[in-house]
Image: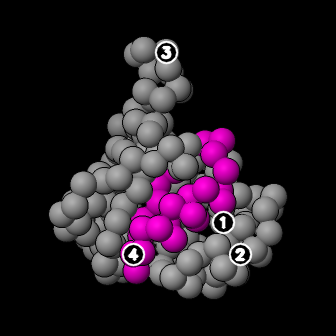
């Protein structure tokens, strides 16, 4: 299984409702994601599933990637990608999903802890991810079974450089 981790792009500090879950991407964050999405599509990930955090900014980050990759299925909302969720819970969800390539869109510190867990097989190590950055791991069919191999970790600036020009 190939697991891509994508941290949401820059979001507004406060939502109209005052709820953290409702914070949208800033105009700059949305623009960056359209460019990053073209770079992700250029990598030809062939996603079987895209899982997103329940928070609005994660969905708004995933949508341009899904469009750019011509992903035709519905995005799957997962509470296991919420900011303070247990990283092991999303690995259990992936094992049950039985996909060969997935995109997980979420937040810090959760994605950083998931990155550390995939890299070392041990909980508690956080590898920080910048907003709109992408990492990919090669794991077995059950990603809980051992250490995954890091394929790449790309900053948003590098992704913007990789994006095809319009």
Q: Residue 65: where, in percent of width, then height?
A: 31, 60
Q: Is residue 30 visible?
A: yes
Contact check, label 4 and label 3, Cβ < 8 Å: no
Q: Is residue 8 visible?
A: no
**What whole-number distance in Å separates the C-alpha atoms at marks 1 and 3?**
30 Å
Q: Is residue 86 magenta?
A: yes
The residue indicated by pointer 1 is 115
Foreground label between 3 and 2: 2
Tell me the crowding category of disc 1: few under 14, some 14 to 19, or many 20 or more residues within 10 angstroms, Cα based. Answer: many
Helix, strand or loop at disc 2?
A: helix
Q: Which residues are magenta?
A: 83-106
Q: Is residue 165 magenta?
A: no
Helix, strand or loop at disc 1?
A: helix
Tell me the crowding category of disc 2: few under 14, some 14 to 19, or many 20 or more residues within 10 angstroms, Cα based. Answer: some
Query: Does residue 1 lie above or below 131 as drawn?
Result: below
Looking at the rendering, in which quadrant would you find the C terminus? bottom left
Q: Residue at x 49, y 15 (%)?
A: 18
Q: Residue at x 57, y 82 (%)?
A: 139
Q: Identify the mark nearer the N-term, 4 or 1.
A: 4
Q: Identify the mark nearer the N-term, 1 or 3.
A: 3
The residue indicated by pointer 3 is 18
Tell me the crowding category of disc 4: few under 14, some 14 to 19, or many 20 or more residues within 10 angstroms, Cα based. Answer: some
Residue 79 lies left or right of residue 39; in this view the side is right
**What whole-number distance in Å separates the C-alpha atoms at marks 2 and 4?**
20 Å
Q: Residue 154: where, in percent of width, then height?
A: 54, 71
Q: Residue 146: where, in percent of width, then height?
A: 69, 81
Q: Residue at x 40, y 36 (%)?
A: 56
Q: Residue furthest front?
A: 96
**What whole-number distance in Å separates the C-alpha atoms at marks 4 and 3?**
36 Å
Front-lying residue, 63 or 54 = 54
């Amino acid at each position: 299984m190939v697991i891509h981790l994508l941290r949401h792009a820059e979001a507004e500090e406060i939502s109209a409702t005052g709820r953290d879950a409702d914070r949208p991407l800033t105009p700059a964050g949305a623009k960056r994601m359209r460019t990053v999405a073209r770079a992700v599509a250029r990598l030809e990930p062939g996603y079987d599933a895209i899982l997103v955090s329940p928070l609005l900014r994660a969905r708004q980050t995933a949508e341009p990637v899904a469009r750019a990759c011509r992903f035709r299925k519905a995005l799957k909302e997962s509470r296991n990608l919420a900011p303070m969720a247990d990283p092991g819970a999303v690995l259990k969800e992936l094992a049950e999903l039985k996909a060969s390539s997935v995109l997980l869109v979420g937040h810090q510190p959760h994605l950083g802890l998931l990155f550390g867990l995939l890299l070392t097989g041990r909980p508690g190590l956080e590898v920080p991810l910048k907003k709109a950055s992408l990492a990919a791991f090669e794991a077995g069919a059950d990603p809980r079974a051992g250490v995954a191999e890091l394929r790449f970790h790309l900053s948003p600036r590098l992704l913007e450089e990789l994006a095809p020009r319009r």
